[in-house]
Amino acid sequence: MSITLEDIAMISGLPIEGRALTGKVRAAGWRQWVAALVGVEPEPWTDETRKDPRPSGVLFSWIHRHFHRCPRDASPLVVERFARAYLWNLLTQVVFPDGTGDTAS
């Protein structure tokens, strides 16, 4: 069994008809994009002896550590950020997993 585009449309309520939304993915500035979307900027790679193994993604454990449970008294902005993190985790871990098995791109 596999998830189809129609399944995603039914679950998410997003339309699947019409022109596709495409674009180039740029690794530059990705930490700032994450911070803008979920409110927490991933820590920069600090090991100068090795190349960053994740130049444009975070570990699932990072998402879990920062967004495991939304506070009960959270503002609407915080709830929105937790929802984005949840969807990001769901899409990258379940619907569109990559070969690493531990990274949310």
Image (cartoon, rainbow, N blue to C red):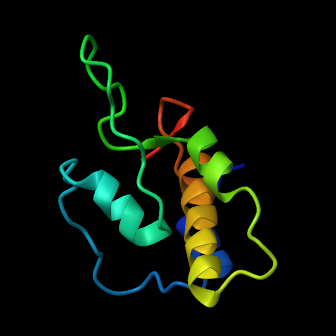
Above or below 4: residue 80:
below
> Is 45 left, or right, of 72 in this rendering?
left
Nearest the eye: 75 or 68: 75
Determine if residue 76 is in view: yes
Where is residue 1? Give x, y as percent: 72, 49
Q: How many marks?
A: 0
Q: Residue furthest top?
A: 49
At 56% from the left edge and 73% from the top edge, which residue is drawn? 81
Image height of 23 relative to 94, above or below: below
**Lateral position of residue 14 relative to residue 26, left or right:** right
Where's residue 42, x and y in %? Answer: 42, 47
Q: Residue at x 28, y 14 (%)?
A: 50
Work out whether residue 94 can be spotted. Answer: no
> Which residue of the protein is positioned furthest toward the right in this rendering?
72
The percent position of residue 85, horizontal first and vertical second, equals: 57, 63
Q: Position of residue 89 (x, y in %)?
A: 59, 55
Residue at image coords 64%, 64%:
86
Q: Looking at the picture, tell me which residue is in the foreground, 55 or 22.
A: 55
With 21 as the anchor, is 102 left or right in this view?
Answer: right
The residue lying at 29 percent from left, 53 percent from top is: 30
